[in-house]
Image (cartoon, rainbow, N blue to C red):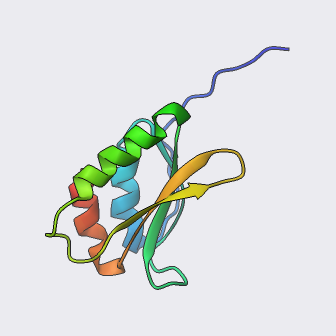
């Protein structure tokens, strides 16, 4: 049986307008693949779920994001949490909807 290596390619995807800047910022990291987002989820927070193409670097990637988000100048609390999808562990960034652009800017 042949095995084929997969690679990540940029694609156009429809996302809520209010979360688009954060989805774009995360997708600038070549090892990150976003797969779910909402500008105002059931808990009232915006979120983007993602996984890392090299699972061995998931912790390092999350640490890098956490360092970029560290600081008191963000207009709202940002939560970075672990997420486990069907086959791949990942993470979620959550924030208040009015903080999305500030969070995206910190990641750019």
Which one is nearer the viewer's eye here, 72 or 16? 72
- Residue 42: in sight, yes or no? yes
- How many numbered discs sit on the rendered protein? 0
Q: Quadrant of residue 85?
A: bottom right
Q: Residue 12 in the image: x percent, y percent?
A: 50, 51
97 left or right of 50 in image = left
Picture layout, residue 48 above or below residue 88: below
Picture layout, residue 1 above or below residue 95: above
Residue ranking furthest to the right: 1
37 left or right of 64 in image = right
Picture layout, residue 65 above or below residue 44: above
Q: Tell me which residue sits at (35%, 79%) in the image.
A: 96
3 left or right of 55 in image = right
Q: Residue 50 in the image: x percent, y percent?
A: 51, 52
Q: Tell me which residue sits at (31%, 53%) in the image.
A: 66
Q: Residue 17 in the image: x percent, y percent?
A: 41, 71
Quarter containing the N terminus: top right
Q: Tell me which residue sits at (41%, 57%) in the image.
A: 23
- Residue 54: in sight, yes or no? no
86 left or right of 94 in image = right
């Amino acid at each position: 049986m042949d095995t084929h290596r997969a690679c990540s390619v940029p694609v156009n995807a429809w996302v809520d307008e209010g979360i688009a800047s954060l989805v774009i910022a995360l997708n600038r990291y070549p090892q990150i693949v976003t797969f779910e987002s909402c500008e105002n989820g059931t808990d009232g927070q915006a979120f983007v779920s993602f996984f890392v193409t090299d699972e061995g670097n998931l912790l390092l990637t999350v640490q890098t994001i956490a360092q970029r988000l560290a600081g008191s100048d963000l207009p709202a609390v940002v939560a970075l949490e672990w997420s486990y999808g069907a086959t791949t562990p990942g993470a979620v960034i959550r924030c208040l909807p009015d903080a999305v652009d500030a969070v995206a800017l910190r990641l750019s």
